[in-house]
Amino acid sequence: MIQTDFDELEKENHLLREELKLAHAAAKVTSTQVVQQFEKTERVLRNFQDINAEHQAVLDAVSQLSLIATDLQGTITLFNQGAMNLLGFSTKDVLHKKNILSIYPGAELKAVGAELSGASHIAIDGIQVFDQLVRRKLLQARKWHYQCKNGDLLPVSVSITGFQNASGERIGYLHSAMDITQHNKLERALLDAKEIAEAANQGLTSLLDNSGQGFMSFGPDMVIDAQYSLACETMMGRSPAGCNAADLFFHDDADKADLLCSIIASVLTESDPCIRESMLSLLPVEIRRDNLVLKAEYKTLENGKFMVILTDITEERRMAAMLGRERRRLELIVMAVSDSRNFFETIEAFREFLANGLPRMLGGTHAPQLLVKELYREIHTYKGLLSQFSFPSAPKALHEIETQLSHLLSLGDALTTRQLAQLISVSSLQAPFNADLTILSDALGEDFLSHGDSIFLSDAQARQLEKLAVRLLRGETVDTSAAEISNLLHEIGTLRKVSLRDVLLGFDGLVKQAAKRMEKEVAPIEVSGGADVWIDPNDYRPFLHSLVHVFRNAVAHGLETPEARWEAEKDEIGKISCTVSMVGNAIHLCIADDGGGINLKALRQRAVAAGIYAAGEVEHVPDDAIAQLIFMDNISTQQEVSDLAGRGIGLAAVLSETKNRGGEVVVKTVPGQGTQFLFALPQQREVSNKEV
């Protein structure tokens, strides 16, 4: 009897020994390995007490793992600490007393049995369920429920394996289980979170699709992802998914496409987020597709990808263009009314040019090479004058002719007068000019333009003249030294004249207009002197018209941007000043700016390129002599041509008109401080009030 008990105890110990070794690698052991460990213990016997102590220590260490072993009939032969913790039974409650079938819910056993039966209709139930699972090697963990001592059903993940004796005969089953209550909670939470995320994603997708904006993303390979907002298809005219972003956005502009690829590659290697943002700001912000204008914003994503946000600004641009045209129309009307004298002088001069000047030049005997330069100066001057009064159409037509004249200049001796006549015709300029004047006649009436040359007297002046005329007709002697007569004669004597001060102040609108377009800040023009210097506008008109180029160049070439002035520790608002004085029989005029001065280095380079100086000698030419080169044709320090500056023609016209009046002009410049244009003009008769 004792021997039998000992044998039974040792058999049980064999199983415990297996569990002990299994626990040493609990995180890695699979159900199959557990069986193998059990089989190994069949071959080695140890002292029962030592094995039992070691077994208990290991089982306590792996109390999270429930191990229940049974014989072939299901009687429980092993019930570790993990099983006790899980189910609430003690080993005394179950060992050799309880059948494993009492732990599994019958409904679940029946369901698994039906699954194993399949189409065979052979009933599989009870312990046969475990037998079939082992025979068919369905060893992967399944979700079951364990019936706890308190009656609760505990969700577990169970792996069922068979184990054998030394002869290879199966002697029982091992049920390895883990409590998956927390796992199920997490899984449920995960499913809930997924549903919430999907709902949020659906809401976001709906929001993006209805936002009217295009959202798409791409990675380092530039290939656009499959997810994008619906507006992208409308904007791009196709589905963007799978397309190369550079080819899609800039299919007709290889430079922009290359720029996009190179900057994206650079951003990927840059770790500083501020530098990355600066790099992205260099990308083209406007994409044109067919008739659409799209604004593009570029964002970096945390996953190493980039997002592009497209906004259709076509209507916005159309409205801006319409508002721009309306603004220019109103500017034209306001400037025509507020500065009517200079306005009418300008349009009369341009009418004279179209009616007589241009036909005379084209029909003259000048060599084509000289004629093209003369035409260039005239066209450039009138473009500036009409732009000063915000004419919308005529300056554009003149700018286009300028561009074509610049191409003809490159022909040299091959240029013919016929080519010039084909390029420039009175009708090509008259049409846009008339369109601009129609704006004024529609707004102010036909009488406004027809009375342009009229001189108006005040009621008081008319009455005084009437009295003077009556006295003279009576033969009375008139004392011109009398204050009343002297003042009247002075007023009448200057009716047709203008003060040079007022003429110079009239360029303030041009200066503000140019500064606004170039995003520069400039104070109102300051004029010192000249209030008592009266000039005949007809006599001085060509010279005064040429001053347009001096003032525009002061803004375009002289004054710096507010940022550059701030860095140079200057007032951010630039200044242009004029000084008028009489020196002997000459009018001295200084027009100065406080900008950065003439770029003499660039001017020397242009002088070498134009063949004026050799590369070896240009550095030895004094700065003052180099500065005077700005009065030569086709010499400009500006690299790019715009409708404001860059052709190298304007100041050549200034020199030409100054010489036509018998005057002189020189330029002085100090780097970082500014530039002065100094004019000396012969005195006109009846210049001063004293002479009047």
Image: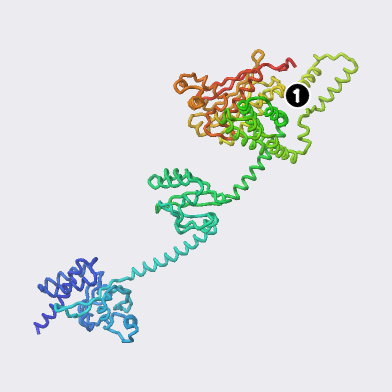
Quarter of the C terminus within the rendering: top right
User: Could you tell me residue 675's position as x and y percent?
Assistant: 55, 24
Q: Residue furthest right?
A: 474
Mark 1 nearby-residue class (10 Å; few <14, some 14–19, many ≥20): some
Q: Nearer the viewer, residue 618 or 57?
A: 618
Relative side of 648 to 276, left or right: right
Numbered disc 1: secondary structure: loop
Instruction: Look at 54% across and 49% down and name the residue there.
Output: 288
- The colour scheme is rainbow
The residue to which callout 1 is attached is 496
User: Could you tell me residue 444's position as x and y percent?
Assistant: 75, 38
Is residue 346 something that shows in the picture? no
Q: Nearer the viewer, residue 684 or 89?
A: 684
> What amino acid is at disc 1?
Arg
Relative side of 426 to 14, left or right: right
User: Could you tell me residue 23's position as x and y percent?
Assistant: 20, 68
Q: Is residue 141 above or below residue 281?
A: below
Relative side of 5 to 260, left or right: left
Instruction: Look at 33% across and 71% down and name the residue there.
Output: 181
Quarter of the N terminus within the rendering: bottom left
Is residue 181 something that shows in the picture? yes
Relative side of 24 to 344, left or right: left
Q: Residue furthest left?
A: 3
Number of numbered labels in the structure image = 1
Q: Nearer the viewer, residue 173 or 415?
A: 415
Q: Is residue 61 above or below residue 250?
A: below
Which quadrant would residue 48 be assigned to in this image? bottom left
User: Could you tell me residue 345's position as x and y percent?
Assistant: 71, 29
